[in-house]
Amino acid sequence: MTGHYDYKNSIPMSDDVDLTDFKRLGLGTDLVEIERFRSLAPDAPFYQRVFTESERQYCMGFPDSAIHYASTFAAKEAVLKSLPSTEPISLRSIEILRDQHGSPKVRLAFDHRFRSLVSITHTGHHAAAVAISHPISESSDTDQMRKLLNGALSEILPE
């Protein structure tokens, strides 16, 4: 497979990508300092206000829950930024779940017409997320969108 680099949008692209399928995509990114979550008290009201019970259980299941809270928060913010809404959306209504392999999945708890995909990464100090949202009615190739998403994320936090 040959490819080129889209310098205007800074995303590595494959020559076989038909961008007409992606013209209605929403893109959102977020970068969070993990230390901000380490400095919060474990019973801080912020956790109840922003995270669902499932998200809190997931994050608290790790010895260093701050990394997972920061990553989940970054994912929620990225999804929020990717959605084309003029109405206020609560971060709690955007739920980041994990599948059996730990990959993040997005569940929106409000009337929506979009599907969102998110990719999350972290270093010792920062958590980052990139989200793509697209209309459910469009026949977009989810695997191709995930490749675009991971390419964008690697541009934010290169190894």
Image (cartoon, rainbow, N blue to C red):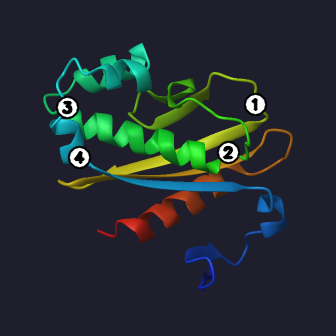
Please name the residue shown 50% across and 56% down the image.
29
Q: Disc 3 designates what residue?
A: 40
- Cβ atoms at labels 4 and 2 below 8 Å apart: no
Instruction: Out of 75 and 13, give the one closest to the viewer.
Output: 75
Q: Nearer the viewer, mark 2 or mark 3?
A: 3
Label 3, secondary structure: give it: loop
Give percent across and percent down for residue 102.
38, 34
- Cβ atoms at labels 2 and 3 below 8 Å apart: no
- Cβ atoms at labels 1 and 2 below 8 Å apart: yes
When the figure is inspected, residue 2 is found, relative to residue 88, above or below; the finding is below
Instruction: Out of 96 and 140, give the one closest to the viewer.
Output: 96
Q: Disc 2 designates what residue?
A: 83
Q: Amino acid at mark 1?
A: His
- Cβ atoms at labels 1 and 3 below 8 Å apart: no
The span from disc 1 to disc 3 (Cα, nearest Å) is: 32 Å
When the figure is inspected, residue 95 is found, relative to residue 43, above or below; the finding is below
Image mark for residue 112: 1
Q: Earlier in the sequence, mark 1 or mark 4?
A: 4
Q: Disc 4 designates what residue?
A: 34
Please name the residue shown 34% across and 70% down the image.
158
The span from disc 4 to disc 3 (Cα, nearest Å) is: 11 Å
